[in-house]
Amino acid sequence: MLSADLNKLCIHTITTKPWEIETSCKKFSRAGVKGISVWRDTLSGRNIRQTGEMLRDHGLSIVSLVRGGFFPSFDPQKRKQAIDQNKKAIEEAYLLGAPLIVLVCGADPKQDLSESRKQIKEGIEHLLDDCRSVNVKLAIEPLHPVYADTRSAVNSMKQANDLVESIGSPVVGVAVDVYHVWWDPELETEITRCGKMNALFAYHVCDWKVPTLDVLNDRGLMGEGCIQLKQIRSWVQTAGFTGWNEVEIFSNLYWQQDQDLFLNKIIQAYQKYV
């Protein structure tokens, strides 16, 4: 069951972006947070294996590494480079001790969305042997259609589920981010379908502010916007998901504030609305 205590609370390092990962580690642990999802930029210049040990020594479970993907390109050489970068991400996840990589799949406006989706499938299939060899899974995160130009040609739960089904590998599943899928009239049906495929790998929470000032960097705290969080939570729970509730907030507003106060707000909103 998705509980209101902190035992299933995970926070992404991007949420408290001004903090270095060492600071996030200490602050999250001290606040009683139990999980952390690590964005790759926070690992720059660090010994990745030692960073993973540091996080675990502070009682934090490493939930995922963020992010891989960005497979499509009109340029074949860029597609090859994307595969190489994703293989590097798999190695980083292994060294860190992260069981999952979240995929922002990418798109190229120079070509049809259908071609980008074909290249996404091909890109993921290139990674399957690497994932199996180190026991790392991949979670396709469908993004809101507003990002279909360059960030992702996978824009609904149905598209993500169809892609998982067509690949047919137990190492590939879906990350449900409420910010991107709350609008979808088929959301309950597709969450149920995802659960039946044993492909519901991750669940991300935040809120859609009204009005939103920036579709990328104006996400709200849970309870600050129009997303029906408890309803979606019930669908995810009914689908059999027992994993982490991952708070992922991109916010120019909150990044400018005192991050200790922001962390307290996250915990309060989590307990009330998630």
Image (cartoon, rainbow, N blue to C red):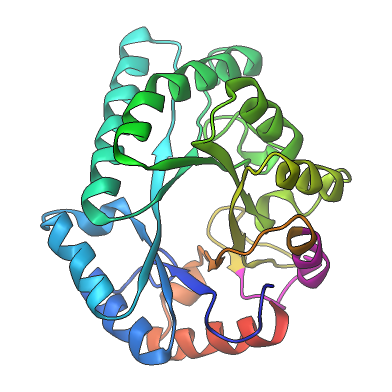
Q: Is 57 inside the magenta-drawn segment?
A: no
Q: Position of residue 13 (x, y in %)?
A: 37, 66
Residue visible at 65% across and 44% down in the picture: 198
In the rendered image, the vertical position of residue 178 relative to residue 185, given as above or below: below
Q: What quarter of the picture does the N terminus occupy?
A: bottom right
Left or right: residue 93 compared with residue 175:
left
Q: Looking at this view, is 196 or 103 the one in front?
A: 196
Q: Residue furthest right?
A: 185
Q: Nearer the viewer, residue 55 or 216?
A: 55
Total numbered circles: 0
Look at the image and say whether residue 226 sits in the magenta stretch. Answer: yes
Q: Is residue 106 left or right of residue 221?
A: left
Estimate the x, y position of residue 39 in percent, counting from the top left.
35, 56
Please give the range of residues in magenta. Answer: 220-235
Vertical position of residue 255 compared to residue 5: above or below: above
Q: Is residue 137 visible?
A: yes
Q: Is residue 20 visible?
A: no
Please state which of residues 102 and 105 is positioned toward the viewer in this rendering. 102
Residue 173 in the image: state x and y as whole percent.
58, 39
Tell me which residue sits at (41%, 26%) in the image: 128
Residue that appears at 47% across and 67% down: 252
- Quarter of the image where one finds residue 142: top right
Measuring from the top left, give residue 208's x and y in whole percent: 70, 63
